[in-house]
Amino acid sequence: MRLFLLLLLFTTIAQAQAINYFNHFTEKDGLTDNKVQCILRDKQGYLWVGTSNGLNRYDGYNFRHYFPNSRQPNKTVSNEFIADIDQDSAGIIWLATNNGLNRYDPRTETFTIWKNTGRNDGSLPNSLVRNILVDDHQKLWLACDNRDLAHFDPITGVFKTYPWKAFLERAQPQSANSDYKNIFTIRPKDKHELWLHTNFGLFSFDTLTELFTSYPLTSGRLATIKPSDCPDLVYQGSLGKDVLRYDPCKEEWAQVQLPIRVTSIDGRRYVPLVFDFGKSYGVCSQKGLLLMDKTTLNLSLVGPTLQNGFTAPTGLLQAYFAEANGMLWLGGDKGLWLYDPLAQHFDYTALKPENTKDVYNTFCRFTDSKVDGRHYLLDFYLGHLQVYENNIHLKTIALPGQTSLLYEDKGGKLWVGGGHQLFQLDRQSLRLQPFILPSEIRPQNHSIFIDMIEDAAGNYWFATNHAGIIVWQPKSNHWWKPGKADGFIAHAATALFADQEYKTVWIATEDYGLFRYDEVTRKFTLYRQEESNPENSIGAYCVNSVCKDGQGKIWVATNPGGISRFDYNAPLGKEFITLNKEDGLPITLIL
């Protein structure tokens, strides 16, 4: 819904208030424009985003764009400025634009447009439509620029207006001298009443009696907002008075000032909206999102931190949509943000907040050490090992090349790969100590270490991306490089998993499939995709990772064959089942 100037939202998001980070979408991600005006999730699951330059439909992966097109007027919007959006119970989507009211039918994917004709014939009062609302009775209400409150009957195609301006001049005689009397937003008040937020304050409209009521704002200095038990408090933003609250129990207004220094272009502070956010009220301002505690009414800014440095909402926020599952979308002049309450269980630390390139803050391995309690993070792209203790950065250790090997063994040694070289970390000096491999099995310069495990016998297995597998038996200090004579033919290993219970080592590769090594028989078995038996073979020969679930079954991720599960207890030839898009996976490329 479009949220502009004086606004209260009644939807409650019931969730914990911890905000660690947001997802941020901009023009680089496919938005037509970074200035987001309105947001809606439709009944089909699409997210609609109205901007200052086009309408967007987001399916979770890509944005589809709608721009005015005179050659196909029934296939797109009538104007690129999308001011507001709503949906009725039949699934019809209604759009307020700077040049007409738009109706989108998702069944036919067609648009119908209504504009002002300039005649007194029941047409749209003004083609510049600021705000729309589908009420609980499925009636469509419109706020057109500098016009009275309007209602549209889709069956007859007739617009009816209600004389708000005449009522305004009676309630506030000083308004008669103003040429601009505007309703900015329409919101539900109760079953048969509407709230109208205008440039002359707050009004309500009874849809049964067709009567207006004015709630004039006291002139002069307002009292500071204090906690209240009144059940029908109305919170709203303002232009110049920060957060305002109307108390219908006492019939009085109060104010709370924002703890930030910011002014609008004309020198006045601007708070576009206030909405219910669980234990707090969300306050959208020119500086981003603030939270106001409902008990203390204290305000705090959700600003950039180590956790959300890349994604904290910044700049002017003026659009909002609450999902039924608790997710919150925010829009403003710097793009679109998504707050997902389920994702807040994770802490995110941006190690390079000054750089937002995709390759930064991308870590392929991390270890919470059981020996020293430190956090070790391996940066694949930059070839760095980052060391943290008590959330304090201790050191950045440069590695001689890319790697994804970071492993703390049962004896407490920390292994690190660097290109084709292998190291152990001295925890006292935080220096890397080279671990020398015999020259006859040492990987060449073009190889890098990928993964490492310990098997049931205490042997160390090392995986590389070009040189296959290397095994070290520390008890005898014997090295072994499995090859064709052993039944292992792969070169590009991607992951290792040691199943101690079954004395089995699983090797994922991207060139031949999945290998299983039996430590008792000392034999390799190769599992590949079988065209004659796709349901009981792995999904693809490119295998990216392996793990074991709580029931003892082995799961492998393939590309592009989805996920496959191995059951030790299944009959021969029936050990695998594979799940892909037909089974509900959204994508078959699994990492």
Image: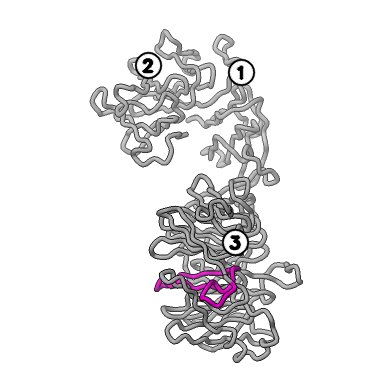
Q: Would residue 308 be found to the left or right of residue 75 on screen?
A: right
Q: Which residue is mark 3?
A: 37
Q: Residues within 10 Å of mark 3 (few under 14, many from 20)?
A: many
- Say what secondary structure mark 3 lies in: strand
Q: Which residues are magenta?
A: 118-143
Amino acid at dot 3: Gln
Q: Earlier in the sequence, mark 3 or mark 1?
A: 3
Q: Which mark is residue 315?
A: none
Q: Residues within 10 Å of mark 2 (few under 14, many from 20)?
A: many
* Foreground disc of the pair 3, 2: 3
Q: Give the left or right position of residue 86, taking residue 260 as reference.
A: left
Res. 8 image quadrant = bottom right
> In the image, is residue 15 above or below residue 457?
below
Which SS class for mark 2?
strand
Q: Which residue is mark 1?
A: 446
Tell me the residue at 45%/34% (across/down). Answer: 589
Q: Earlier in the sequence, mark 3 or mark 2?
A: 3
- Residue 131 x %, y %: 55, 69
The residue singled out by tag 2 in the image is: 524
Please count the marks in the image.
Answer: 3
Whole-percent x, y for residue 235 in the image: 56, 76
Pick the residue in front: 354 or 505.
Answer: 354
Q: Earlier in the sequence, mark 1 or mark 2?
A: 1
